[in-house]
Image (cartoon, helix red, strand yellow):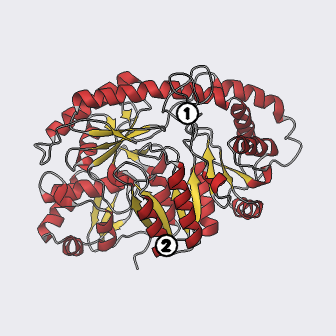
Amino acid sequence: MDSPRSIGARALAALLPDLGQLPGPRYRALSTAVATLLLDGRVAPGVRLPSERDLAAVLQLSRSTATAAYQQLTEDGLLVRRRGSGSYLRLPVGSRVSGPGGRLNRQDEGVNVLDLSIAAMPTLPGVLEAAATRALRQLSQHTGDIGYQPYGISALRERVARRYTDRGVCTDADQILVTNGAQHALDLLLRLQLHPGDRVVTELPTYPGALDAIRSHGGRVVAVPFGPDGRWDAAALRNALLQTSPRLAFLIPDFNNPTGALIGDDQRHELLAAARGSGTTVIADESFIDLDLREHNPRGSGAADSTGTPIERPMPMAAIDDGVVSIGSLSKPIWGGLRIGWIRTDPDTVSRLAMIRARSDMGGSVLDQLVADEALADMDSIAARRRAELIVKRDALLSELGARLPAWQPSYPAGGLSTWVTLDAPGATPLTHLLEQRGVLLTPGSRFAVDGTLERYLRIPFALPPAQLATAVERMAQAWADLGPRQVRRPSGALVPA
């Protein structure tokens, strides 16, 4: 078995895309693919790579091809070779960790980079300042105790519970555990419920942070592709649940990250019935629940059609089956720097999670939770402002893509922060490398898969201002053209519904 500081040839090959689909000589395709694994955080700096001979044998390449790829990585400053010891990945000179997931940015901090690798936005002007001012007035009520709150403060737990109840999921405060964001929530659940070797069903594509967390806890991912309509393939999900009997299923039914898809009631009912039959616990990530972009009602707080009639939202997963574990966060609607998330489950599980949590960080910041409680009091108006802002940015991005890259096919996201783009040929990984050199950071589709597939896809967030999105798309078009003639061209740039 490989040590944590090395990766075997077969394990590395499982993470690589199909090199035959990448442009350029095969050695360059291999070096680019390995570099992407490092920069995206899927393989850590300091890890020893397999020998050139072993990797060449597994990939069915000549040894000279593997040697040339390792030499290219060395010249790029990503690999150090030690005589008699092996070849080790290294941090690029001047690199720094950028955002969630451990992604490395090789650009200097002073360079004006258009970062489209993260689906997140700055806070709205004045929102947190006002919430923090009100929170400070409440702080003295909490400073008389020791301040360790592994469950979270009562006021915030009650506020979150009321929001679930208002959505049709009757919830008490003792069913809520406050966490340091949604990723922390998922990690706690995996620590409690997952054992090494257990299977976890996910969508394909899905949130990379979830894949990383599942693998770090020894889980085995069973990824089920979306159907041709951009939504769950209910039959495939049902079969995966009944045939593999996974311990857990991690799903994003409300504005999937990265596709933006919204799953309807029928598919939710069908999935949950199959999960009950297989004894699988479903974890529903609702981080994007407040970013419904189907339409925006300026007179109210929710999504509505052009006449102002509210658009019906599918039932929450936990309203269909109370055994569903729901996780949420303020990172997307409010601000990623406010590290507040939560778990909704049964009270006994909340207590067990609190015990695990108390052994690591002992509890979150009380002041941050007070700020979050005050912000949640205004969430409806904050979310309405977010939706109005995002609709403009989404439409601007889709317009630019249609004009400059008509052969690409972006999804038309029902909500969330990104569009999932089908390229007219494989090549997402080399494209993102070329764009990085031109000051645009993007994440290839392979980052949203467990096995290096999805080289024909890109996630493009629409979090930046429209002018910056236009600049980014212009550079994408130039870089795509510079990669050389494509093998496949699609005649239409029509949008694919999400």
Q: Give the camera-side residue of 53 and 494.
A: 494
Which quarter shows the N terminus?
bottom left
- Residue 30, horizontal then vertical, whole percent: 21, 59
- Residue 180, horizontal then vertical, whole percent: 64, 48
Q: Quadrant of residue 449?
A: bottom left
Which mark, by number, is residue 331?
none
Q: Is residue 245 visible?
A: yes
Q: CA distance from mark 2 to mark 1?
A: 34 Å
Which quarter shows the C terminus?
top left
Q: Give the camera-side residue of 40 and 227.
A: 227
Name which residue type carries label 1: Ile
Q: Work out whether mark 2 precedes mark 1 in sequence or the reverse, and give the earlier one.
A: 2
User: Does 82 appear above or below 337?
Assistant: below
- The residue that label 2 is drawn on is 242
> Which residue does the image show at 48% across and 33% down from the upper left?
294
Q: Secondary structure at mark 1?
A: loop
User: Does 282 appear above or below 373?
Assistant: below
For residue 128, side relative to residue 311 (left or right): right
- Residue 299, horizontal then vertical, whole percent: 61, 19
- The residue that label 1 is drawn on is 311
Q: Secondary structure at mark 2?
A: helix
Name which residue type carries label 2: Leu
**CB of mark 2 within 8 Å of CB of mark 1?**
no
Task: Choose mark 2 or mark 1, whichever is in front.
Answer: 1
Q: Is residue 194 visible?
A: no
> Which residue does the image show at 56% across and 30% down from the upper left?
303
Q: Give the camera-side residue of 339 and 3.
A: 339
How many numbered discs sit on the rendered protein?
Answer: 2
Q: Quadrant of residue 17?
A: bottom left
For residue 344, side relative to residue 9 (left or right): right
- Residue 287, horizontal then vertical, whole percent: 56, 44
